[in-house]
Amino acid sequence: MEKLNGLPTEGRSVAEIREHYEVEKELAARLLATPRAERGRAYQELYDELFRRIPHHPQLRTKTTPAQRAREIAQPLAFLARFATPTSTYLEIGPGDCALAFAMADRVAQVVGVDVSEEITRVGAAPPNFRLIISDGTSVPLPAGSVDLAFSDQLIEHFHPDDTVEHFKLVRRLLKPGGVYVFRTPHRIHGPADVSRYFSDEPQGFHLKEWTYGEIGPALRNAGFSSWRGYWSAKGWRVRLPHAYFTTVEKVVPRLPTLLGRKIARILLPNLVAAGVK
């Protein structure tokens, strides 16, 4: 398998990855410079532009069989089932191919998917209790207090740093009392998880900010969530651990040599999975 800077190229040429990096870095700089009042439209336009300019983008090229996709969503589906009931309204923000959202439709009363890009969200026949909304992610046309469970996967790292707490406030407003927002995002301690990982130690593409648990807790509290939970998550296991576990690891690992620290971090903090409770 071909590699670039020690990382597998995942079926793309080095030239394609460099092109992707340069285009995404350009568009990310434009998004960071966009005034708040214009960012809602900019999110949609710049993501659509990325997928038009980079037809070899992994999200457009990756093909899996229905059986493979079912195996991929089995673990998050089982985890989300902890928080859902047959009468729940489930909101998924950034559902992509909607495979998980469709699977959740068998377990809840209503499913709503919200995505930023028509270029990446192409769904076929949907369950009767599912609907898709194309939105900028900073506004969702649903009534306040109408959602029992919200979920996003690999989403909040794409927000402008100034918009993340506003996003949390939006989701909290949509949740019913006691409702839960579950989300997964790359942990900053691992180094960039976007295309810039091939070229930089800091995210320079559409991962506008990668987070730590020590930052997530205050952000959720600032958004008005009553509490939050952190989970150690890897290989299908999701184990709730005390906040002190995460913050202690986050203090110790950066003191280690970079490569060693990242190897240890992938064991002790393989993903950042959290749940905010209204």
Image (cartoon, grey):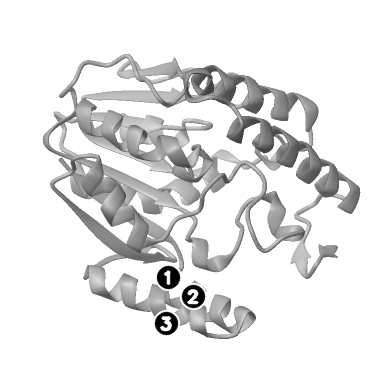
Asked if residue 145 lies left or right of residue 182, the reply is left
For residue 1, what is the image quadrant?
Answer: bottom right
* Residue 199 position by quadrant: bottom right
Does dot 1 land on a helix, a strand or a loop?
A: loop
Q: Identify which amino acid the numbered label 2 is placed on.
A: Ala
> How dense is the environment of label 2, judged by Cα within 10 Å: few (below 14), some, or many (20 and up)?
many
Report the residue marked by disc 1. Answer: 269
User: Do residues under tags 2 and 1 come within 8 Å of each other at their CB atoms?
Assistant: yes
Above or below, 266 against 264 in this view is above
Residue 6 drawn above or below residue 215:
below
Give the distance between the C-alpha atoms of the residues marked 3 and 2, in whole angstroms.
10 Å
Q: What residue is drawn where x is 80% and y is 52%?
A: 11
Query: Is residue 122 in view?
Result: no
From the viewer's side, name the closer residue of 189 and 147.
189
Q: Which residue is mark 3?
A: 252
Q: In the rendered view, tell whether residue 274 sits above or below residue 89.
A: below
Q: Nearer the viewer, residue 148 or 265?
A: 265
